[in-house]
Amino acid sequence: MRRQSHDQQENNIFSSNEQNINNNSNVIMTNVNPLEVESLTAEASSSSSSNKLHNSPLPLPLRRNIIFILFATVLIFFLVVYTHLTKSNSSFKSISYSSNTKDIAMKTPITDGIVSGSGLFIEKGTIAIAKVGKSGTISYYHCGPKYNQHNNLEESQQQNIEMLLLHGAAFSKENWLKSGLLDRLCTERNSNNNVSVTAVDLPVNSDGKDLNALFTVLVQHNIISGRPLSIVSPSASGKSIVSLAEYAKSNTPPEKDYLTQIVHSWIPVASGSVLKASEETLYMFKKYNIPILAMNGNEDEKGRLVTKRLVQYSNAEDVEIQGGHPCYFDSPNDFILLLFDFIEKIPMNFI
């Protein structure tokens, strides 16, 4: 009986404690803010993710390298795009000038450069000339002194030679470069930096007005001094020089003065336009004291006829070297020697 009473007492105590626990739980749950519960849940989730990240199989230095590589790749991509857009949007900068020549679009030239086999720097550029050439631009190579607008004439009086190289129908200025002739013309008699050579891609169908437009722009950009030039005109390119003589014959200003303003001496190499020109036109070179070295190859019959006609009507000197129509490429040593010997004996102020 006593034992039973004791067991019943213990059961009552246990039931009472369980009821107290439940009551306390209800109190706790009642006092918890739902937002706090949500926050605790999020923190637990974040902690779990962080643990997963720290437990990643990739070491920390490797992860940093991957992130750096990705960042560098994106940066390089944007730099490439920016550079491309900058180049594609580049344009000529206009400058003002005064000239009697119409329709010449004066722009600052786009310039670059190359270093020849001898170590010579050769400027490569493009100048804009409206209505000359298919695109309205003429490309050129230049070596030797350049001039500024304030001392062109003073410096050019100290300059022994300023040479302009044209080209025949089958060639371009690139042939002057690739043949090595441009390099040699720039260096072989240039110990005092007193030789300026400019090779241009003037179209072979250009006339005297086109040549004058080219001359004007080259002066404006300080590539040449503005004094008359020694002009080499192989084959079809001689048309522009003969055209200057036609203007001089017509006596119509301002074109009548182009011949003496542009040409100091003329070196035609089998220039076929001579055969079509009148005797009166060819006489203009003699009348205005334009020295001429008429050159042809010994295998070029037509070239020989050109030389003979210039000797007859223009008081030209004649020379024949080994080779065909482009004899200057066939016999470059003879060409350079004869060319310089001819030009150097003519005073710069001869005309």
Image (spheres, rainbow, N blue to C red):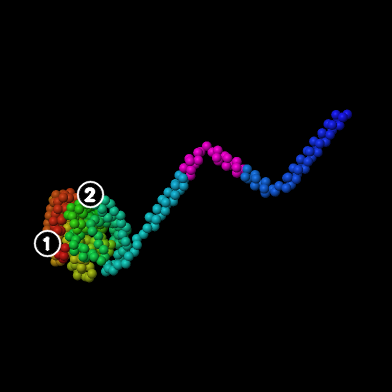
Which numbered tag is attached to residue 38?
A: none
Camera-side mark, 1 or 2: 2
- Mark 2, other Cα within 10 Å: few <14 / some 14–19 / many ≥20: few
Q: Residue at x 22, y 68 (%)?
A: 255
Q: Is 151 left or right of 315, judged from the image as shown?
A: right
Examine the residues drawn in magenta and state their main secondary structure.
helix
Which numbered tag is attached to residue 315?
A: 1
The stretch in magenta equals 45-67
Residue 82 colored in magenta in the image: no
On the image, the x and y values in percent for residue 333 come to: 16, 50
Q: Secondary structure at mark 1?
A: loop
- Mark 1, other Cα within 10 Å: few <14 / some 14–19 / many ≥20: many
On the image, the x and y values in percent for residue 27 come to: 75, 45
Disc 1 residue type (three-letter) = Asn
Give the residue pinned by disc 2. Answer: 118
Q: CA distance from mark 1 to mark 2?
A: 38 Å
The quarter of the image holding the N terminus is: top right
Q: Residue at x 18, y 67 (%)?
A: 249
Q: Residue at x 14, y 64 (%)?
A: 350
* 67 w.r.t. 289: above or below: above
Q: Is 62 left or right of 161, judged from the image as shown?
A: right
Disc 2 residue type (three-letter) = Ser
